[in-house]
Image (cartoon, rainbow, N blue to C red):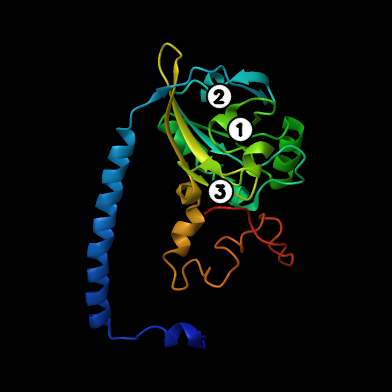
Amino acid sequence: MKTIVNATTIANHSVVSGTRWLVARQALLAREKELTRLRDEVARERRALPWERVEKEYAFDTPAGRRTLADLFEGRSQLLVQHFMLGPGWEEGCPSCSYMADHVDGMRAHLAQRDLAFVAVSRAPLAEIERFRRRMGWQFPWVSSHGGAFNHDFHVSFTEKELARGEVDYNYVRQHFPAAEAPGISVFYRDDEGAVFHTYSTYGRGVEVMMGTYALLDLAPKGRDENGLEHPMAWVRHHDKYAEQPQGGACCHG
């Protein structure tokens, strides 16, 4: 069988003997172990963060009727919320948030075994969420915060007045943001008495924790291959649109 080699890729890399390759790989392994230890250390610091009690009575529209934030735990003590960019009247959800969501259904059984529930929350009305969910074929819980303050309180939805100022509070800094909706992940804990606590939120590139595809691409010779694009995630499409011509790329994720 003839081996097809990408000449450009080869030109950017040395080709060495197996012995020299092993030496280089062992050196990189030492760096990878440093990163693993650092990641574990940061995870411990994350778990040690102080909590804030959720005092507001947030309520959501769900296929099973009106539900509170505490109800979304489904009997578990931990809840992970994907703040999914789907605003009222949008024809479809953000491609980047959809890319995140594509990884969820296969994980849910495993998350449940570690006492963690998952739900996506969007500001679009429930009927609009359900229409897009059916198109994507997703099974995970997805609820609507339409008419409520949840998205604004967790800094993933911005009013026209906020956007008119030119800067919004996002990812723990005041910055320019190009849209009324933003991506994020928030984590909550519910105690035996039913009190709910906010334990963690991450935004911007922090949401890459849900993008397992990126972790695998980072192992490959070409990596994410995003150099020269209009923005890093410009290649991302809804999974049913990759056969189409580019339509302007994904939403923000900076």
Residue type beneath disc 2 = Leu
Determine the CA span between mark 2 and mark 3.
Answer: 20 Å
> Is the residue under label 2 in contact with that under label 1 (CB below 8 Å)?
yes
| Secondary structure type for disc 3 | helix
Q: Report which quarter residue 86 is drawn in.
A: top right
Q: Report which quarter residue 147 is drawn in.
A: top right
Q: Which mark is residue 237?
A: none
At horizontal 46% and vertical 82% (from top left) the residue drawn is: 9
| Secondary structure type for disc 1 | loop
- Residue under circle 1? 141
Residue type beneath disc 3 = Met
Q: Is residue 210 something that shows in the picture?
A: no
Q: Where residue 32 sits: x, y (%)?
A: 28, 61
- Residue under circle 3? 100
Who comes first in sequence, dot 2 or dot 3?
2
Residue type beneath disc 1 = Pro
Who comes first in sequence, dot 1 or dot 2?
2
Determine the CA span between mark 1 and mark 3.
Answer: 14 Å
- Residue under circle 2? 72
Is 205 located above or below residue 116 in the figure? below
